[in-house]
Image (tube, rainbow, N blue to C red):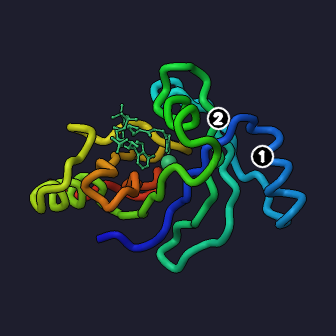
Amino acid sequence: MLTRIDHIGIACFDLEKTVEFYTSTYGFSVFHTEVNEEQGVREAMLKINNTDDGGASYLQLLEPIREDSTVAKWLAKNGEGVHHIAFGTADVDGDAAAIKDKGVRVLYEEPRHGSMGSRITFLHPKDCHGVLTELVTSAAVEAPEH
Ligand code: V0V
Ligand code: CO
C-alpha cells in the first residue's frame, strides 16, 4: 500500500546553487547527500516533514554525473524542473507486482538501490499520464515475506 509522498525529484544543472535556493528561500535544510553511480546522479535530500507511518517526505535535488544518465537526457530536453514523484510503501516488491498486473510498465525486474539505503523501482511515465513515478521502501522498513 502506498502510504505517503516519499519525495519529489527535481532535476538541476548545479546541485550547490539549487540547494542554496531551497535552503535560503524556504528555510529547508539538507538532511543527506549521496552519489548514486548506478543512476548517474548526485543528490541532496531536504526533509520537509515526518509522517505518521514513521517515514518522512523530502525534496530530492538531482544533478547528473554522466552525460548518458537519464537525468542528463531529461535536462537536455526539458531544462530544470520536476523530474519524478516517489510514493512510499512498506512493500515495494508487492506493490510493484500489483501495479504491473494492472498493465503499467515497471522498469526494473527487482528493486534497485536508492537514496539512504532504500529500495526503489520506477513506473514508465507514458503509462502514468506523463509522470515518471517511483516506489520507495525506506531502509528502516523490514521487507515482508513473499
Ligand atoms: C522521459 N519521459 C518522461 C520523463 N523521462 N516523462 C515524464 N517525466 C520524466 N522524467 C518521456 C519522454 O519525454 C519521452 O516522451 C518518453 O518518456 C521516452 O523518453 P526518452 O527521453 O526517450 O528516454 P528513455 O526512454 O531513454 O528513458 C525514459 C525512462 C528513464 C523513464 C525509461 O528516464 C528511466 O529509466 N528512468 C528511471 C530512472 C531515473 O530516472 N533515475 C534518476 C533518478 P516522448 O517525447 O516520446 O513523448 S534516481 C532516484 O530517484 C533515486 C536514486 C532515488 O530516489 O533514490
Ligand atoms: Co527519486
Q: Nearer the viewer, residue 60 or 80?
A: 80
Mark 1 crowd level (few <14, some 14–19, many ≥20, 10 Å Cα): some
34 or 9, which is in the foreground?
9
Picture coordinates of residue 8, whole percent (x, y): 55, 58
Residue in the image at 70% along x and 35% along y: 13
- Measure how far apart labels 1 and 2 are at the Cα level: 10 Å
Residue 77 at x, y = what percent?
A: 52, 36
81, 6: nearer the viewer: 81
**Which label was assigned to residue 63?**
2
Q: Position of residue 70 (x, y in %)?
A: 46, 32
Establish whether ligand 1 lies closer than 8 Å to the Cβ of label 2: no
Relative placement, left or right, of 23 versus 9 is right
Q: Given the current orientation, which residue lies at the most extreme top position? A: 67
Residue density around tag 2, few if under 14, some if 14–19, many if 20 or more, within 10 Å: many
**Vertical comparison of 1 with 23: above or below:** below
Task: Relative to 56, say whether 13 is above or below.
Answer: above
- Residue hosting label 1: 18
Q: Earlier in the sequence, mark 1 or mark 2?
A: 1
The kind of residue on which mark 2 rests is Glu
Quarter where residue 58 is shown? bottom right
Q: Is residue 121 left or right of residue 118?
A: left
Q: Residue 33, percent across and down?
A: 69, 40
- Label 1 sits on a secondary structure element that is helix
Amino acid carrying mark 1 in the image: Thr
**Pointers 1 and 2 in contact (C-beta within 8 Å):** yes
**Image quarter (top left, top right, bottom left or bottom right) of the N terminus:** bottom left
Q: Who's the residue at 23% across and 55% down the image?
A: 96
Residue depicted at x 52% and y 24%: 37
Query: Element at badge 2?
Result: strand
The mark total stands at: 2
Q: Is residue 91 above or below residue 69?
A: below
Q: Which image quadrant for residue 141? A: bottom left
